[in-house]
Image: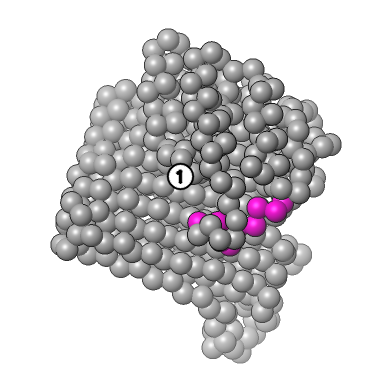
Amino acid sequence: MSDFQQQALQLAGQQQSPDWLAQVRKTGAQQWLKTPWPSRKTENWKYTPLAPLQRSEFQQWAAKTTGWQDGIDFLELNATRLVFVNGVFDAEASDSELPAEVVRFGDASTDQQAVIAEHLGRIVDGEQHLFAALSNAWASEDGVLVHVPKNGELAKPLYIVHVSTPTGAPATANQRLLVVLETGARASVIEHFASTEDEQDGFVNSLTEVNVGENAELRHYRINLEEENLLHVGGIHANLQRSARLRGFTVSLGSKLKRIDYQVNHCGEGAHLDLQGIYLPKNKQFVDYHTNVQHKVPHCTSNEVFRGVVSDSAHAVFNGRIHIHQDAQKTLAELSNKNLLTSRKAEVDTKPELEIYADDVKCAHGATVSQLNKEAMYYMQARGISRDEAQVMLSFGFINELLQEVAEPAVRDYLAPRLAQLFSPNTDLLRHLQYE
């Protein structure tokens, strides 16, 4: 067992947690103990450097701080807002009244506790996902439940903001979300992970579990725009029942350690997944996306599109796996990963995978790694656009196509200028970029 694994269990012992979460915590701790620490020989962690975690001593929980508001830009949209600072609920920054479908674990009624007990830690496989087991061991009152009953609809999007601030010593935050949509239910959820501009010194472990019921639909957005020294391991695990629909969008900057897993299980016929992602590491940052889509039953569809722009000496990893089980006839599954390297020192490892055991399916997957098109650069420079301007326009254009497909206008309008600024922080080149 590694030093970090020992520290993590000590942190679990320091928590105050509701008694009804005791079994989830106990099971998570047991799985955390018996699972070997990943090494470079562990296939799913082959390119992911866990050294930043092992070098730090996380011996305390991060505490809520004040004075962080000036450093955080919120999305401008009509939504229900919940704010957590270093993993601790901030009532003053959150909406005072929550809809009946949304509750913190610590405020859950007896019926809501029953829903949490039924689903929490059951959608994710803690034996296969090490940091999910850790999240179970760290389950606390600051988790969030979204439970939409049969044929119900969340009146407004739920906007959950997780803010990280430096605490003076390496500290941890555990962030947990459980979404349960009953038959015919609909909801839109935005998870926004942000930090102040100060150099961060913490570790965030975040886990979202989703059960989309029969003929239900969830639109889920995950935005990771933290400062580059923050360590973050996250996961989104979803079960899709008959004719369920999950439409997901994710965007992430890099950091010393940034790892995000998507595990989606098609459990009912006619289920559909539409997942799009953007990653933008620069400097010496690292980012790793692992997706695993399990087609277990017939007549299901999935479409994944991920694009990355890797700059400077940054390193990106994308591993996309589609598993078609023997009974999953009439499956339609597509996966595309495209990468743009804007520096000779930039690096990307991409690995699309198809594992097919059914014979009546349509599947496609592909990955590309390229540099800026020389002909396009020449064409733009020949028309009076400087080399720097051309590089910015081509780089942003590479991801702008996905941004324009984001269904929630407030998310699209928030991200477009901020991501464009990454390519041109010190000039007025942004005037050339069209967001609409």
Question: Who is closer to the viewer here, 302 or 136?
Answer: 136
Q: In the image, is residue 229 part of the stretch drawn in magenta? A: no
Question: Who is closer to the viewer here, 269 or 120?
Answer: 120
Secondary structure at numbered mark 1 = loop
Colouring chosen for the image of the structure: one colour
- Report the number of discs: 1
Q: Is residue 131 left or right of residue 180?
A: right
Which image quarter: residue 75?
A: top right
Residue ID for mark 1:
128
Q: Is residue 328 left or right of residue 78?
A: left
Q: In the image, is residue 49 part of the stretch drawn in magenta? A: yes
Q: Position of residue 62 (x, y in %)?
A: 73, 31
Residue 101 appearing in the image:
no
Which image quarter: residue 58?
A: top right
Q: Residue at x 80, y 35 (%)?
A: 167
Q: Is residue 418 above or below residue 372?
A: above
Q: Position of residue 31 (x, y in %)?
A: 51, 35
Q: Residue at x 57, y 87 (%)?
A: 374
Q: Which region of the structure is painted magenta? A: 44-52
